[in-house]
Amino acid sequence: MNEQQQNPAVKSPWKRRFVILFVVTVVLPAMVLIWLVQRFAGDVAVDYDSPAEHFKYGSTGGEHEMGFPYWIWRALPQVCPQYLPGKGYQSLGMVFEKNADGSDRDVPVGTSRRRYQGIDRVFVNCAVCHTSTVRTAADQPPTIVLGMPAATFNMKGFEEFFFRCAADPKFAKEFILPEIERQGGQLDLLDRYVVYPVAIAIMRDRVLALAGRFDWVFKQHQWGPGRVDTFNSAKVIFNFPMAHLDPAEFDAPADFPSLWRQRQRKQPHEMQLHWDGNNTTVEERNKSAAFGTGTTPPTIDLARIRRVEDWILDVTPPAFSQFFPIDPALAASGAPIYKAYCAACHGASGSDFGGELVGQVTPLAEIGTDRRRLDSYTYTLAVNQATLYAGYPWRFTHFRKTYGYANMPLDGLWLRAPYLHNGSVPSLRDLLEPATARPKTFYRGNDVYDPVKVGFVSDQAEVSGKSFFLLDTAVPGNGNGGHEGKAYGTELSPAEKSALVEFLKTF
């Protein structure tokens, strides 16, 4: 008898081999597969309990298609500093909140974060264009104001930084990974040797592909901080033949708008929205704006965007009087002047939007302001926008081509400088002068406020090493004419103008 027959306790070597083979070929692959699914199949955005925090850092869904791997985002300002005007994203006018120890937060206001396909991704959200800072003096700390136009953010510079950096030889794992490690990014072995090297290659290729499509950006005049050529960017997304468009459509920068009191723009009747009044539905306007944060119809995060929509319905701007004093007697003398010259188009006050022409479009021939923004939004683009969300219940149906600019309510007016749709007039006091007397050039990007003229300080080229953008009103798209003549108050006496400006501080 052999040993196995003599001792049944001795197991068959074939059974052992079968068990080992089963574990190696079935159990271990299954465990690895489960681990890989857990590692790479998640889709989890970072959420915030506070509506204001969600506005600042919550996702719109843009990280799915456009999201930058978090540590690459962190590393690039050090890898490609030559393509920034100063140190880090702060030099592009992005707003950073402080941590308890006084250091800057790891991402600026207007940047969201999501874990997707096994990697933390970041991209911009609504707050990047609708948050800025105000300082009462150059030596005073900034106050962050949510919902105001991002008067310091240089979007064109932001785009060009990534385009130029992606084309640089240093946009490679040999340079980015050491910088990630230097900044404390403790990547695990899989991230270090597989995930991030692949992510760097994919990001480089995708950004360079976008750079090719957005080549027209480099050929336009600089927008400067606080402005964007909104609808020419949309034409790129729709694959318009940019090289063959009417040159009159280009160089159409417009200021970022404010986002306060949106419910009053819906009730009791819907106003015409955007600078040219091309839509009357706040929700469509919001979804259209979300494309600027990298969303697409399949990836838009409607639930999280709805949180922003709900918040902006009733959020209000801070009062001028919280920062600077107002002369009550002078403001009172300006109230009847405002009622006679401004109320019909702009509302009874900063909180009362009543007025027969509020939210309606004034024809260009009457208002006379720079026409580039109006001409950039063409009938063909409006037709293309109607195809967005085709097959979805929220398909766009309200975009229309208009022939003028909309009369805006003036809530938080003091924080919406510079003025006119293209930000070509630095202060309210300047706006009350005829175009020939308005500044021909001035500087944008300063967050120090001038409470007398009601606008940001605009006569300084540089402060403490930070340079500001020189806006030249002779450049196409920057015209500062229009909104002038007797009907617009530019023929009032100096005393009347001072009273009117004082009253407008109460908005």
Image (spheres, rainbow, N blue to C red):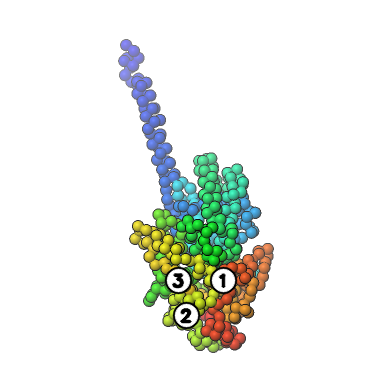
Residue wearing tag 2? 345
- Closer to the chain start, of discs 3 and 2, is 2
State the separation of the CA atoms marked 1 and 2. 19 Å
The residue nearer to you, when weighing 26 against 83, is 83
Residue 479 x %, y %: 58, 72
State the residue at coordinates (50%, 69%).
374
Amino acid on which the number 1 mark rests in the picture: Gly
Label 3, secondary structure: give it: loop
> For the residue carrying disc 2, how many other residues have a C-alpha within 10 Å: few (<14), some (14-19), or many (20+)?
many
Q: Is residue 332 above or below residue 48?
A: below
Label 1, secondary structure: give it: loop
The label on residue 402 is 3
State the separation of the CA atoms marked 3 and 2. 17 Å
Residue 506 x %, y %: 52, 80
Residue 397 x %, y %: 38, 65
In which quadrant of the rendered image does the N terminus lie?
top left
State the residue at coordinates (52%, 75%).
413
Amino acid on which the number 3 mark rests in the picture: Thr
- Where is residue 356, by image quadrant? bottom left
